[in-house]
Amino acid sequence: MEIVPFGPDDADALATWTDLVNAIDEADAPWQRSTSPRGADARWRHGFDGEPGTPHLARVDGEVVGWAGYEASDYDNLHLGWVDVGIHPRHRRQGYGSLLLAAMEDKLRRLGRTTVAGGAWDAYAFDAFARRHGYACKSTEMNRRQVLADIDWPELDRRYDAALPHAADYVLERRLGPTPDDELDALALMASSINDAPTDDLDYEDEVFSGGRMRAYEDSVAAHGNELYRVVARHVPTGELAGQTVVAVSRDQPGWGSQHDTSVVRAHRGHRLGLLLKADMLRWLRDAEPGLDSLTTWNAESNEQMIGVNEILGYVVLGRVKVYQRTL
């Protein structure tokens, strides 16, 4: 088997990878939004927030049978690397996945990473593969979708109004598009509150946020062909940013939106800001994006507080991803 790395400037390889991952998703998670050519380019040029991984295509006798990639952040978690392995449904159970996984582990080992993690849909075959290679399940993430047409708007308004008295010292601010440069550091400080979200049994350190990382994230959102919507809660007495929720609405694939970060700074919890932020975002999107059909989101299965908010707002479960980890 030939394993060859490629980058976003290799148009043929990028197109091949896009078709491959869409075929894999059609078999394993058909509810997923398909990967667009622009999304593929942005993923391998920008990553999620400025640190793209390194993808590889695997060929046997000239035919593409699968792919794999690895990521190793320089922002934080310098001991950790992440791997992805995908095999075309026609070519599974022939040992290709094992060869690709070993190759990516070797890449990370050469970078000095001592721990490797990766996710897979909750299925017996994937679980057996992970455990056979020494990986243990350390966390489970839930993929949920909210259909805007199914929202009970009067009930949402009632819950919003009931929560307002608990947040009398706060004001919600709507922001569209990039953050001004002079506010990026304050935004990064607020974003760091996401570190309080559960990571279960993963060997995972707090993420380190900076103004530069926040800008890289916003650049990536734009490169993916998305419009960035952000609602922040500001504490009026101090002027501090107390919480936020962020949604990316696709321009290339109309009707699709992704719920990204929702977090509240620890010192400002207990005022129902999470519900207020997400409800205000939905009301904004209803008016500003009449063509938006649905939002997808991810949460750790153990994140009961945020899952509770999502269930109030009508999110339904699509699937589970198990996150596996091993020490090299």
Image (tube, grey):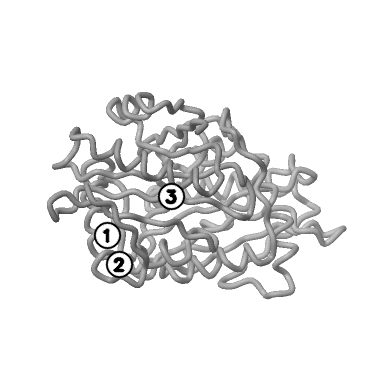
- Check disc 2 and report the residue beneath it: 37
Q: Quadrant of residue 225?
A: bottom left
Residue 238: image location, x then y, percent: 86, 58
Q: Are marks 2 and 1 in contact (CB under 8 Å)?
A: yes
Q: Could you tell me the amino acid type at mark 3?
A: Tyr
Residue 86: image location, x then y, percent: 29, 44
- Could you say which is closer to the camera, residue 87 or residue 26? 87
Q: Quadrant of residue 27?
A: top left
Q: What kind of element bears circle 1?
A: helix
Q: Residue at coordinates 60% horizontally, 44% vertically from top-left?
A: 159
Q: Residue at coordinates 40% horizontally, 65% vertically from top-left?
A: 250
Answer left or right for 178 relative to 39: right
Q: Residue at coordinates 38% horizontally, 70% vertically from top-left?
A: 251
- Check disc 3 and report the residue beneath it: 70
Lower sequence index among marks 2 and 1 = 1
Mark whose residue sits in front, 3 or 2: 3
User: Is residue 84 something that shows in the picture?
Assistant: yes
**Distance from the alpha carbon under mark 1 to that under mark 3:** 17 Å
Lower sequence index among marks 1 and 3 = 1
- Could you say which is closer to the camera, residue 253 or residue 83? 83
Classify mark 2: residues with Cα within 10 Å, few (<14), some (14-19) or many (20+).
some
